[in-house]
Image (cartoon, grey):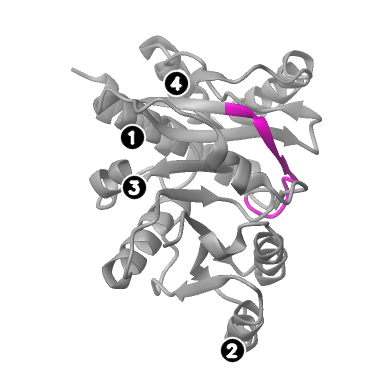
Amino acid sequence: MSKFLNIVINYANEEEVLNYATQLSKQSISKDIVLVVVNNKISEGIKVDFQKELEDLNITTHLFDPKSNLGYLNGAFFGYRKYINSASNRPQWIVISNTDIIINEKDFFKKFLESEYSEDIWCIAPSVYNLKNETYDNPKYIDRIPANKMKKSIYIHDKPILSSLYLTLGKYKAKKNKRIKKESQYAYAVQGCFFALNIEFMEIIKNQEYKGFLFGEENFIAELITKQNKKSYCNNEIEIIHNEKTSTGGLNYQKRAQFYFSSHKFIYEEFYKD
């Protein structure tokens, strides 16, 4: 029986997916990890070799093709449904992650399991060190974002230049305030580049549609967890490195603003409006 189902998205970044899969194959409990790759976009003429290289690794792997770009979270939901419909057993934890991740600790997943968590914790994330910004990015938000701040965010991201300035300022602020790793703690929302959901929660939300497409996934998951009267937790005793580059780094400021605007507007209308 697998303990972890790790779902990742391939968006024509096969080399990075392979590098991440190789890291999983070197984990001390790799036999307890199943990797699901959702091909939102695959490079021309590479599909057969890509699949073969994954199969040659010391880890169970499944590839699923949705025939279109579903985005990050919807792609993960798709991958989970495809896997679980034919799986002979159910994993304990479903990890949804980027592939621009470095896991230096070979006992990372083992230590994840050995940690004790209360039964009300349905989402767990490790310490996330952002290599580019030199910051510790978990927790994402300790408390729920107030409605007035959500409305302000929607207003800002509706204007691409203002959005770009706002995001740049946010990075400088993070570099100042997130230099030191925090203690393990409960959080409203965890960093979206790597988080684990327990199977009970995933079964509840597997048919959800995230209408924001990209960005804001952390808030969406946080709201769904709160709706179930459960919690998120940052286990900062274990750590990954986020080598942020290909996952969203290629977006121009206009497209980025558009995604932020649509995701924050969706979350506000779905969870904040009476």
Q: Amino acid at mark 2?
A: Val
Stretch in magenta? 235-247
* Residue 53 left/right relative to 258: right
User: Residue beneath label 4, please?
Assistant: 188
Looking at the image, is mark 1 or mark 4 nearer the viewer? Answer: 4
User: Residue beneath label 3, please?
Assistant: 199
Q: Which mark is residue 266?
A: 1
Looking at the image, is mark 2 or mark 1 nearer the viewer? Answer: 2
Q: Earlier in the sequence, mark 3 or mark 1?
A: 3
| For residue 124, above or below residue 17 | above
Tell me which residue sits at (66%, 45%) in the image. Answer: 108
Tell me which residue sits at (35%, 61%) in the image. Answer: 78
| For residue 66, above or below residue 193 | below
Q: Earlier in the sequence, mark 2 or mark 4?
A: 2
State how far apart marks 4 and 3 are (Cα): 20 Å
* Residue at disc 1, secondary structure: helix
Q: Position of residue 222 (x, y in %)?
A: 39, 29
Q: Position of residue 115 (x, y in %)?
A: 55, 33
State how far apart marks 3 and 1 are (Cα): 25 Å
User: Residue beneath label 2, please?
Assistant: 48
Q: Which mark is residue 46?
A: none
Q: Earlier in the sequence, mark 1 or mark 4?
A: 4
Tell me which residue sits at (30%, 32%) in the image. Answer: 224
Q: Earlier in the sequence, mark 2 or mark 1?
A: 2
130 or 155: which is nearer to us? 130
